[in-house]
Image: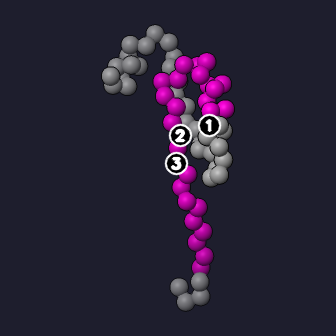
Amino acid sequence: MKVTEVLSRSKETRFSFELLPPLKGSSIQVIYDAIDPLMEFNPLNINITYHQSEVEYRRLPGG
């Protein structure tokens, strides 16, 4: 089923959530603990985003 079909058939407001993943070395339990209180809203989906690598740019002599 397409998202547009789900939304057009829905009789109530629908939610989706986007969460940041836990920091490296953290337990999956961190995600479960974040999701549990959201379940009462009956979300269509819960998306766990991706942490981009942190990049630091420095100007160096000579370019």
Q: Which mark is residue 48?
A: 2
Residue 39: quarter of image: top right
Q: Nearer the viewer, residue 25 or 8?
A: 25
Residue 6: quarter of image: top left
* Drawn side of residue 44 relative to residue 35, left or right: left
Going from the N terminus, do you reach mark 2 or mark 1 first?
1
Placement of 53 over or under 15, stated as above or below:
below
**Which residue is denoted by mark 1 in the rendering?**
31
| Point 32% across, 22% down: residue | 1
Q: Which mark is residue 1?
A: none
Q: Position of residue 22 (x, y in %)?
A: 63, 45
Within-10-Å neighbours for mark 1: few <14, some 14–19, many 20+: some
Amino acid under label 1? Ile
* Drawn side of residue 33 relative to residue 41, left or right: right
Q: Which mark is residue 50?
A: 3
Residue extending farthest bottom: 62
Secondary structure category for the residue under label 3? loop
Amino acid under label 3? Tyr
Amino acid under label 2? Ile
Q: Are marks 2 and 1 in contact (CB under 8 Å)?
A: yes
Q: Are marks 3 and 2 in contact (CB under 8 Å)?
A: no
The CA distance from mark 3 to mark 2 is 7 Å
Circle nearer the viewer, 2 or 1: 1
Residue 9: quarter of image: top left
| Point 48% across, 24% down: residue | 44
Secondary structure category for the residue under label 1? helix
The CA distance from mark 1 to mark 3 is 13 Å
Region of the chain picked out in magenta, as a range: 31-59
Circle nearer the viewer, 1 or 3: 1
* Drawn side of residue 44 relative to residue 56, left or right: left
Secondary structure category for the residue under label 2? strand
| Point 59% across, 79% down: residue | 59
